[in-house]
Amino acid sequence: MRNDPSMLNLSYHVSQWKHDYLTAFKRLCEHGVQSVEMGSALLQNPSVIKSDLEAHNLTLSSVFEFGHFQSIHRKREILMHHRLLAHKLELLRVPMVALAPGLRYKHTTLSEMYRFVGEITNIYASYNITTAIHPHFKQCIFYEEDIKSLLENVHSPLFLLPDTFHLNLANIDCHSFFRQFSTFIKGVHIREPLHGLFSSLHTHLPKNCLLIIEEKEKASPSIATIDNNIEEVKKFIGFEA
């Protein structure tokens, strides 16, 4: 695969494959893809995952998890969970965790949430792991004002890994968002490759930003879907197997 540093780095989210992820690994390897993103639920045995990745010449670009930022009533449990996950990521040499915010709770104030996010971020930072927030529909960080306020009020190193599908649901213009938050964006989830979107990604995002292909929600994973997604992306980012 040609690796031009001016290109976006390609990864593929495989959580929908669940425990059949090896089928996805094999096909992605055949396409020349070099990294994948997985949900934390698949990391029950890190040594097995490590072996499976190495067998297919893949690395983990990032791991997806829920942050539960407003679940202050479960603070001790949640912080312990993040410490255990950070330890697994360190063993697997995963550079980034993507955290979906979790549900809103009326009894949790914004200032409490920001302090909690800072504590979680500091856990991952202590393992040299980047924390990227994944704004999500019907969760406590979703709208543009939620995102702005979070970045302004959390003083730990914090970044973004938005999903174009969720940005659209929040009525956020992707082009404007990429331009405004380019220094914070470490990666982008995409579900439907579009030429206009890739032009914006190229224009506004930093070099080596992750472009993570995610299959449509509730769709059954298939080899044909992987083939189609990879072929579409190849047209726009200069990726070649």
Image (cartoon, rainbow, N blue to C red):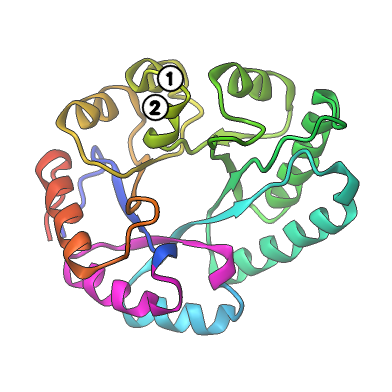
Q: Is residue 50 above or below residue 220?
A: below
Decide: is 227 above or below 73.
Answer: below
User: In the image, is 71 to the left or to the right of 178?
Assistant: right
The answer to whether residue 190 is left or right of residue 95 is left
Report the span colored magenta: 17-42
Residue 2 visible here: no
- In this view, the residue in front, 223 or 131, is 223
Q: Residue 227's x, y, as percent?
A: 15, 61
Q: Which residue is mark 2?
A: 168
Q: Residue at x 64, y 40 (%)?
A: 101
> Mark 1 touching mark 2, by CB under 8 A?
yes
Residue under the image location 69 percent in, 66 percent down: 87
What residue is pinned by disc 1? Answer: 171
105 horizontally vs 19: left or right: right
Q: Which corner quadrant holds the N terminus?
A: bottom left
Q: Check disc 2 and report its element: helix, strand or loop.
A: helix
Residue pictured at 80% horizontal, 24% vertical: 110
User: Residue 51 bears which disc, if any?
Assistant: none
> Does 80 appear above or below 173?
below
* The magenta stretch spans residue 24: yes
The span from disc 1 to disc 2 (Cα, nearest Å) is 5 Å
Percent across and percent down for residue 144 are 54, 19
